[in-house]
Image (spheres, rainbow, N blue to C red):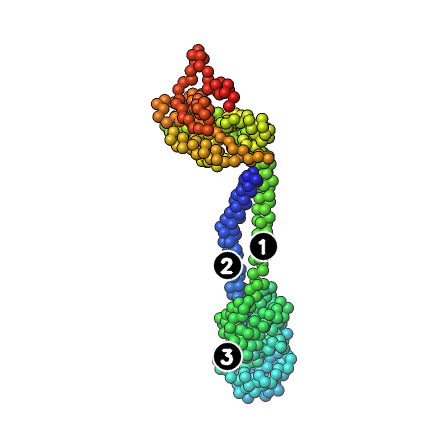
Amino acid sequence: MQHRQNIHNIYVIVGLAVTLLVASFYLLGMRPLIKHLEYIHDERITFQLTESSALIHSIFDDQRNIARQVASRSAIRARQAAYLRDEIDREALVAFSRPKLADAIGAHEDLVSVARYAPDGSRLYSAGVAVPALYDQKCSTAPDDRIELLAADEARHRLYYCSPLHDATGRRIGTDLLVMHDQRLHEAVDRQTRPGVGLALIFGEVRSSYCSTQKITPRMSAALMQHLDAATPTDGFTIRQQRLERYPDWRILLIVDDAEHARPIERQILPLLVAILASTTAIYLLTVITLRPIIAALLEQKALLARSRCDGLTGAHNHAYMQELLDAELARTARYDRPLSLILLDIDHFKQVNDRHGHQAGDRVLRILTRRCREAIRETDQLARYGGEEFLVILPETGRAQAMALAERLRRDIARDEFQVPGERLRLTISLGVISTEGQPRAVDKHDLIEAVDRALYRSKREGRDRVSDGAIAPAASPASGRKSAAASRGEEGK
């Protein structure tokens, strides 16, 4: 379970690293890029408004130039001036001038017809298609110095201009009403309209308008009408307008469908986001796939190492690892001059448990004793199976008094506890020996330390068991002295 948790933690860390990488890329790279694209996209609206204004200006300028060219034909002007001086009659004027105007109409693609009026507003003659009479009196009030657009008839595709006519001295001698095709306006509006952005050209306050009939949607058209009716914005649409600088009666409006307008950005950004998500997912999966056998091998090695250090029956440290722990703790004790204590404990009359209840019951007693000891000691303390039914407790940073108190508590707890074995509850006692490096003036040899705690345990056995004895550290007696070792003596006692 611990191994699975470790693997899970590694995968979580890898996932968080990938997530942090994606978040950094988005916040530091993608987000500014999206803002820049949105800014450029909005700038295109402003540019389109300016470009459309210039295009419409050029169309109107061309048509006014046509009006000036028609008005500047000197032969026709001379005949009209002669007519006004009563030098020729109207029939002669018409006979001479109408073919000339017809030639002018044929020479200009935009020009449909021309009607010429006297200074009092009466029509003298016309050329081309019929000119509606409702405009006859409007040209008589036209200014003397400029060409004026009277009306835009979008339904009939006509534009009506009044153009003043002057003689060589600059005196006004009449007015031309010119009827022009508006096809170029329609083409310009269609050319400037694209998905999500519609162009409308409005003349005056009567809303003679030019809109793309093919590309503008009904929703965009409804938004435009609402704007013109109430001059209020419509949800989901942005409308920008600009009056033509030289022709203030005309307004250009751009109707922007916000959702459709943003779609090109989405089409650019979404594949990139999907690619980033796919690549980061692939990186995560490849990392997991690559790390999985490595992690599993490391964890297996860790598990094997842990099993090699543990006693197979009780789960406590085994004797070999106990020796390594003692070496490390003695070195730390010598380096920092801190006390180290050992407790060696043995189950009293354990052989009788095996003889009466069987070795399985004895194994169960050893496992229960191991659990009780672990519950009593600190996390920094180490418990090892010294051999048989003997257990050694290594107590770093612990003086003699603390070690004696712990050993006494262990003895009492075990003595009043019951050990459940098949068919019976046993009461057992333990004998304990305690040794400490506290107060030692020199570095302690490991073998002297173990021999001292072994002698202390032997003393508890010898004095009646179920007790705690402390000992002193001294070099072991030489074999020549004839004294038996503590371990050998305890072996003869038969525990």
Residue 340 occupies which quadrant of the picture?
Answer: top left
Where residue 122 sits: x, y (%)?
Answer: 56, 87
* Dot placed on the residue nearer the N-terminal end, 2 or 3: 2
Q: Are marks 2 and 1 in contact (CB under 8 Å)?
A: no
Residue 484 coordinates in the image, percent (x, y): 46, 16
**Residue at the image point whose x is 48% and y is 18% from the top:** 489
On the image, numbered disc 3 is attached to which residue? 168
* x then y, percent, for residue 83: 56, 86
Q: Quadrant of residue 139?
A: bottom right
**Label 1 crowd bin: few (<14), some (14–19), many (20+), radius 10 Å:** few
* Closer to the eye: label 2 or 1: 1
Identify the residue at image location x=60%, y=40%: 289
**Mark sitting earlier along the chain (2/1):** 2
- Residue 39 — which label? 2
Secondary structure category for the residue under label 1: helix
Q: Tell me the residue at 59%/46% (across/down).
A: 281
Which label belongs to residue 270? Answer: 1
